[in-house]
Amino acid sequence: MIKVLLVDDHELVRTGIAALLNAVENISVVGIASCGEQALLFTEQLRPDVILMDVRMPGMGGIEACRQVLQAHSTAKIIALSAYNDGVIPKQLLKLGAMGFISKNSAVTEMVKAICTVMSGEIYLAEDTEDNITDQYAQKTENSPFLQLSKREAEVVSLILRYHRSIQEMAQILKLSDKTINTYRYRVYEKLQVKNDVELTQLAAKWNYAGIDLSI
């Protein structure tokens, strides 16, 4: 069962989306928040699998809420919701570490697809949103800083980005010691000039890098 936290300042929107998602097999809306401040509190209390976050809210808006949620919970999977699909806001949220962006005009089938996609560790952009930000968001792959990683380093990065594994889990999967995993992680940080997994996720979003499929 995928646990979803819904954050939106409009009661009718919250009620409608919650009813639609609760009718879908294997998805449960475990919490409904009306502002960014509640989103932080409910994320801590409920530990949802996916957070559907409205971008424009009074008080702490969705962008700042996204930033603070990811600072406290770096593996949180956030899908931004907006009535607007211009390139600036989606790009900003993806750089912060959000894993998806869909329009409030999307059908429930697309919302479910977005939830399942980010649960698998991949980034999801609604088609109309992707069309609007392609020129701004896409980077030439030949310039990507991730190309300098060795195969083993790329595997470690992928386990962090796509599967959100702990050091111990990564060691078991790659059949290496915890110490060796930490060494590869340190090398990745040095090569990419990041300080932690949050900055790594932000850099990956900036370069549209989702990691490699390890088929685990």
Image (spheres, rainbow, N blue to C red):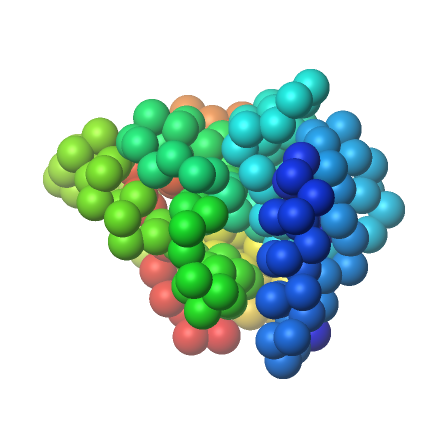
Which quadrant of the figure has residue 155? bottom left
Residue 161 or 108: which is nearer the viewer?
108
The picture places residue 46, in percent across and down from the top left corner, at: 82, 52
Q: Which residue is painted at 75% across and 49% down in the image? A: 32
Q: Taking 117 as reference, is 164 above or below it?
A: above
Quadrant containing the N terminus in the rendered view: bottom right
Residue 191 or 123: which is nearer the viewer?
123
Q: Taking 87 as reference, is 154 above or below it?
A: below
Q: Taking 51 as reference, is 23 above or below it?
A: below
Q: Which residue is painted at 86% across and 46% down in the image? A: 45
Question: On the picture, is 141 further left or further right than 9?
Answer: left
Question: On the picture, is 180 further left or further right than 92?
Answer: right
Q: Which residue is painted at 41% across and 51% down in the image? A: 105
Residue 188 or 4: which is nearer the viewer?
4
The picture places residue 132, in percent across and down from the top left corner, at: 23, 38
Which quadrant of the figure has residue 88? top left
Q: Taking 25 as reference, is 174 above or below it?
A: above
Question: On the picture, is 136 further left or further right than 29?
Answer: left
Q: Which residue is painted at 27% across and 48% down in the image? A: 128
Residue 213 or 47: which is nearer the viewer?
47
